[in-house]
Image (cartoon, helix red, strand yellow):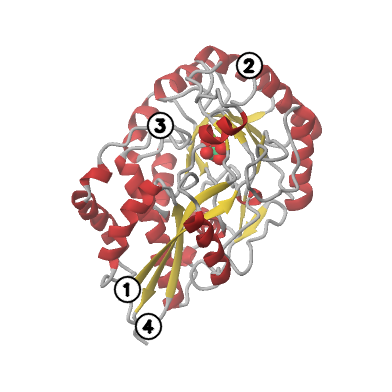
Amino acid sequence: MTRDLTITAVHLTPILVADPPLLNTQGVHQPYTPRLIVEVETADGVTGVGETYGDAKYLELARPFADKLVGRQVSDLNGLFTLADEVAVDSSRVFGQVDVGGLRGVQTADKLRLSVVSGFEVACLDALGKALGLPVHALLGGKVRDAVEYSAYLFYKWADHPEGVASEKDDWGAAVDPAGVVAQARAFTERYGFTSFKLKGGVFPPEEEIAAVKALAEAFPGHPLRLDPNGAWSVETSLKVAAELGDVLEYLEDPALGTPAMAEVAAKTGVPLATNMCVTTFAEIQEAFTKGAVQVVLSDHHYWGGLRNTQQLAAVCRTFGVGVSMHSNTHLGISLAAMTHVAATVPDLHHACDSHYPWQSEDVLTERLAFDGGKVAVSDAPGLGVALDRERLAFLHRRWLDDDGTLRDRDDAAAMRVADPEWVTPSVPRW
Ligand SMILES: O=C([O-])C(=O)C[C@H](O)[C@@H](O)C(=O)[O-]
Ligand SMILES: [Mg+2]
């Protein structure tokens, strides 16, 4: 049977999804976070879905991209990058260098463009898989495991968003000290069966975070632990923390900011260093790997440009004896499904992937993905194996439409200023 894989329509739906008051070194999560849901429709009536960052910058790029996609084949995945280049030329204003830095590493025009491509790539793969009756992992060469392991992503957290801020209530409670962090970790294991733990640090002075990791090590002896202050520490502080926690850490994630600082830390500690901040594009690999700055690269398939680029990154890491795993930002089930399909195809995945998904009480799927024993089963259903809940999508889109613009760009520092009007994004290194 032949199928007509021509793309006849593309729909972009920006949404705002509830997010708890999770703390990081820049501030606190806003009550709602923007995401973009991409749908591509083929001439045969097959629809594929994708998800990516939804801030205004991404939307501005996604719109002309969507227009140009109509008439092309969902199987033309390489063509997505050519198309992105064409859009780049057309919209040079948006594609000018956007060098704002932040928790996703330095945000270059290239990275924004690739994040947009990833949403479309996943949607095309989903449509192609549905059209051919094959799961996305099969289109990527086939799974080498039946389930993908994730780590519990622990955050220092307030019980509620600051007073006066409209938000959805969560049932996690506060975690602002070692006891709170351990209680949160226990809840993660009880609810989802996670066996490895990552604590988002850079929030409290390092001694307090060291105490929290030691408390985790005592509560969960032998379990893999990570600490990620998002580059908030000096080289000296990073080395002190490495010395204190060397025995219990699987790796230390982005203790210091940037490749030169990470290389200095790496040269003086045996604790492996991981990053989702200094190696975020192919162009950044050479310097980091030749300087021995990182031992594990955490891919985010969004800003690496999709699932096939993630496989290429894994191959480069393998070549250089560098480990690979996955980073995440606030995301929904479409992204978790995409992460799971690609992770299932990566041979040397020796570290549990990160996911914010347990923090998201809302989704756009008819059925949420489940963690069983800390793992997500790899779907063998055609495409990603997920179904869009159109009512939920419309509801979350309505929230985006109703917003006065203040929440359409993620801004953790602005959210923190609601609680503390004097707050400014701390300069780095903070400690
Ligand atoms: O591993 C990381 O660096 C992240 O997950 C970055 C995120 O932005 C995280 O810090 C957050 O959501 O607050
Ligand atoms: Mg990180």
Residue 61 location (% of width, % of height): 31, 52
Residue 101 disc label: 3
As shown in the figure, which amino acid type bears the numbered disc 4?
Asp
Give the mark, 4 or 3, whose residue is nearer the N terminus: 4
Q: In this view, does 394 lie to the left or right of 164?
A: left
In the figure, residue 281 lies in which quadrant?
Answer: top left
* Residue 220 in view of the camera: no
Q: What's the mark number on residue 44?
A: 4
In this rendering, which labeled residue sits more in front, label 2 or label 1?
1
Residue bearing mark 2: 243
Amino acid type, callout 3: Gly
Three-letter amino acid code at disc 1? Ile
Residue identifier under label 1: 7
Which of discs 2 and 3 lies nearer the camera? The answer is 3
Image coordinates of residue 271 in percent, x first then y, are 58, 24
Residue 372 relative to residue 314: left or right: right
In the image, farthest residue toward the top: 236
Residue nearest the observer in this picture, 216 or 85: 85
Q: Give the mark nearer the N terminus: 4 vs 1.
A: 1
Give the alpha-carbon distance from disc 4 to disc 3, as whole Å: 43 Å
Q: In this view, does 196 lie to the left or right of 138?
A: right
- Per the image, label 4 sits on a secondary structure element best described as loop
Please tell me which residue lies in front, 204 or 314: 204
Label 4 – label 1 distance at C-alpha? 9 Å
Check if mark 4's residue and mark 3's residue have beta carbons within 8 Å. no
